[in-house]
Image (spheres, rainbow, N blue to C red):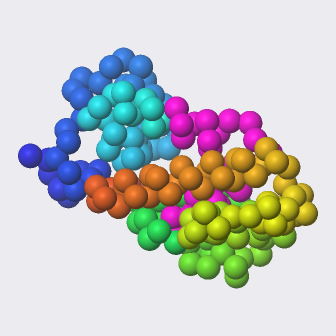
């Protein structure tokens, strides 16, 4: 049975032991760069194929070249996660917004009420669209996409906003369902 005080989730799904060499190297890189292995990775490490699928999708959506900056993608992650009350993602991605922006107050605003944040009109339109997709995606219209174009987003950017939004709506639900806990280190980062 897993020690619940240090477990990444409320489920008893032990990590593959030993980890495959490539996975161990990836975890070592995380530990070197972040000072920890994010619990989201530890949560998926009971099934290496699921972990690899998750990390491939995350890396593509959040780190691949895009007209959206890494900060903007993290802002979307936090706004979606805030609406969904996903504790793990609010904490982890809120820390990323603080670190990438150099503004602790921006990370807090994304979690609490992004409408009060000092952001650009483009970012506001992007976050409004992400929230709309989260609440009622089927109600999205050509007018909504045009609002983004008018704010300076390309059609590729709109696709990327939708992809980040969809990814975090999925992962928020998984994280909430399995009781995923944020690493304690996130709470003190970039403050």
Who's the residue at 56% across and 70% down the image?
135
70 horizontally vs 107: left or right: right
Q: Residue at x 61, y 63 (%)?
A: 138
175, above or below 117, in the image: above
Q: Evaluate whether residue 69 shows in this view.
A: no
Task: Give the quadrant of residue 141.
Answer: bottom right
**Left or right, 117 with reference to 188:** right
Residues in magenta?
Answer: 56-82
The spot of residue 18 in percent (x, y) is 24, 23
117 magenta-colored: no
Closer-to-camera residue (134/49): 134
Q: Is residue 110 or residue 83 the one in the foreground?
A: 83
Give the side of residue 16 with respect to residue 65, left or right: left
Q: Percent from the top left, x then y, of residue 179? A: 29, 59
The answer to whether residue 134 shows anywhere in this view is yes
> Residue at point 63% right, 60% down?
76
Q: What residue is shown at x 20% (from left), y 42% (from top)?
A: 13
Q: Does 2 appear above or below 181?
A: above
């Amino acid at each position: 049975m897993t020690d619940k005080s240090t477990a990444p989730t409320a489920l008893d799904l032990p990590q593959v032991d030993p980890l495959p060499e490539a996975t161990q190297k990836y975890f070592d890189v995380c530990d070197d760069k972040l000072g920890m292995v994010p619990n989201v990775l530890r949560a998926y490490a009971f099934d290496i194929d699921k972990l690899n699928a998750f990390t491939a999708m995350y890396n593509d959506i959040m780190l691949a070249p895009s007209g959206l900056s890494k900060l903007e993608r993290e802002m979307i992650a936090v706004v979606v996660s805030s609406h969904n009350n996903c504790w793990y993602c609010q904490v982890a991605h809120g820390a990323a917004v603080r670190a990438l922006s150099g503004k602790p107050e921006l990370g807090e605003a994304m979690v609490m009420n992004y409408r009060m944040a000092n952001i650009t009109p483009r970012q506001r339109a992007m976050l409004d669209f992400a929230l709309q997709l989260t609440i009622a995606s089927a109600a999205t219209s050509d007018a909504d996409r045009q609002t983004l174009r008018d704010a300076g987003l390309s059609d590729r950017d709109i696709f990327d906003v939708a992809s980040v939004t969809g990814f975090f709506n999925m992962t928020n639900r998984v994280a909430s369902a399995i009781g995923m806990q944020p690493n304690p280190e996130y709470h003190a980062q970039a403050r």
